Amino acid sequence: MRVVPVFRKWFFLLLSLIISNLSVSAQKVKVELVKGHRLQGEIISYTYGDTLHLMVNGQYPIKIPESEIKAINFPSQKKNDNFIAKKWLNTTRLAMDIGATANSPSFSHTLSKRIFSNINLFAGIGIGIDNYYLSDLYNVVPIYGSIKYYFIKQRFSPFIDIRYGYGLPWPFEDSANGGKHFNPIIGYRIGGSGMMVEITGGLKFQKLDYQFISTTEVSDYDILIKRAQLGINFTF
């Protein structure tokens, strides 16, 4: 079943919006130099370990080598915005799977742990429940691993989340077999502490095998379910 016409426009629109947010907008900062001097201005660009380009008074761009910088302070950053300090994430996801044959709900919960102390990269495991054709026969319970990366360390950040695992048909029957589950997601996080909201979009692929037995014949169906997906995460 082809679902490309269903999600192509909104998928590339969402992708373009997230990519556009990856560019660093001008941020007002206070720079403390090794020799004791202090400067205030807007960041033009900053390469860690190399050079800071700073716009002073809106009209004087200067270059500051990393070796001369003692600290860079972001006055606009909220004190309770401590996402960089989070070691664990719990993410509950509610989504709508959009397909050519049916639109149906899905639910999942993921527990993730930060891999590196100074990088917003998380690895985790999760479980969910998907309903592909609004019928009990097509319920699937995916059990998956997750790799999630936030591009920006501040309060608002785009991210990617790649989920891969195995989906089990439910109710569990001898006539149904599960298969590989693949769910790439892109999204945008709002908030840096407490309960955070994430707006997401993605794709979902689920392999299933069903056997239908009638009075006259036995039919085997090898199904690859394809869905576009829109959802919302609640992360804490």
Image (cartoon, rainbow, N blue to C red):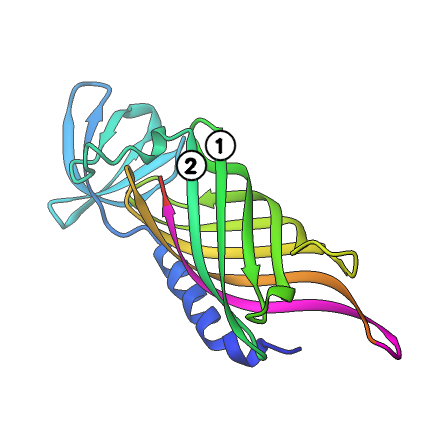
Residue 101 is left or right of residue 85, and the answer is right
Amino acid marked by disc 1: Lys
Q: Earlier in the sequence, mark 1 or mark 2?
A: 2
Residue at point 62%, 57% (across, down)? 140
* Stretch of the chain drawn in magenta: 215-234
Q: Do the residues labelled 1 and 2 touch (CB within 8 Å)?
A: yes
Residue that mark 1 sits on: 113
- The residue at the point 19 percent across, 32 percent down is 79
Q: Mark 2 points at which residue?
A: 89
Q: Quadrant of residue 17?
A: bottom left
The x, y position of residue 76, in whole percent, is 16, 40
Of 99 and 47, the residue lying toward us: 99
**From what the image shows, is residue 27 above or below residue 14?**
above
217 within the magenta span: yes
Q: Disc 1 and disc 2: Cα gap in Å? A: 6 Å
Q: Where is residue 87 in the image (x, y as percent from the top left)?
A: 42, 29
Judged left or right of residue 94, residue 28 is left
Q: Residue at x 49, y 36 (%)?
A: 112
